[in-house]
Image: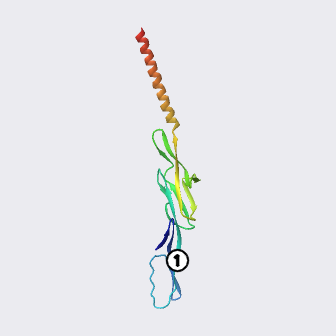
Amino acid sequence: MAIWRRGFREAVGPWSAVVINIAVFTVSANFSVIADRPRTIIAGWDTEYEVKVKTDHGTASGSGWCLAGSTVTVSISTTLIEKDFFANYVFKGWVIDSEIISTSSTYSFIVTGPLNLTAKWEIEYNILRLSLMIGLLISIIIAIFLLLKRWEIRESA
């Protein structure tokens, strides 16, 4: 059983009961006791917050309902993904409300409330590949120009 609000819930935690002056504890959501005399039964409640992790590239982990005060780790599967021959997507960090809070691919924090983390990616161009392509294009243009000049010289002779 849980009481839910946006990003927050109270979930039934450990039950406890006094049976013949002996304390009995269970973490089960279901608990049975014989009601043959007055008994004290206490339901424990745990506060949980929802942590959401979003990424446009790769795979992010760490989303889910987490106990208040617990340490949670979110991570991204890879920090570099090839976009095409000339560019890559590069992981730049974890963002909350448009602010980068960590540039590490793995980020640990203590849960104090609902949280939405987004992986920030930027496109970085491969300068070596771009330079090689530009060099190749210039070489082809020069070769065509020289061939046309040679052809023009033959035509005039």
Could you say which is closer to the camera, residue 27 or residue 35? 35
Q: Position of residue 43 (x, y in %)?
A: 51, 79
Spot the residue most to the bottom.
Answer: 37
Q: Position of residue 18 (x, y in %)?
A: 52, 85
Name the residue: 50% across, 74% down: 13
Label tally: 1
Name the residue: 45% across, 25% down: 140
Is disc 1 surrounded by few (<14), some (14 to 19) or many (20+) residues within 10 Å?
Answer: few
Spot the residue most to the left.
Answer: 155
Name the residue: 52% across, 59% down: 116
Secondary structure of residue under mark 1: strand
Asked if 22 appears above or below 12 in the picture, the reply is: below
Q: Position of residue 6 (x, y in %)?
A: 50, 65
Asked if 151 appears above or below 44 in the picture, the reply is: above
Q: Which residue is mark 1?
A: 44
Q: Disc 1 marks which amino acid? A: Gly
Direction from residue 157 to residue 114 in the image, left or right: right
| Viewport quadrant of the C terminus | top left
Spot the residue most to the top.
Answer: 157
Q: Position of residue 14 (x, y in %)?
A: 51, 76
Name the residue: 45% across, 22% down: 143
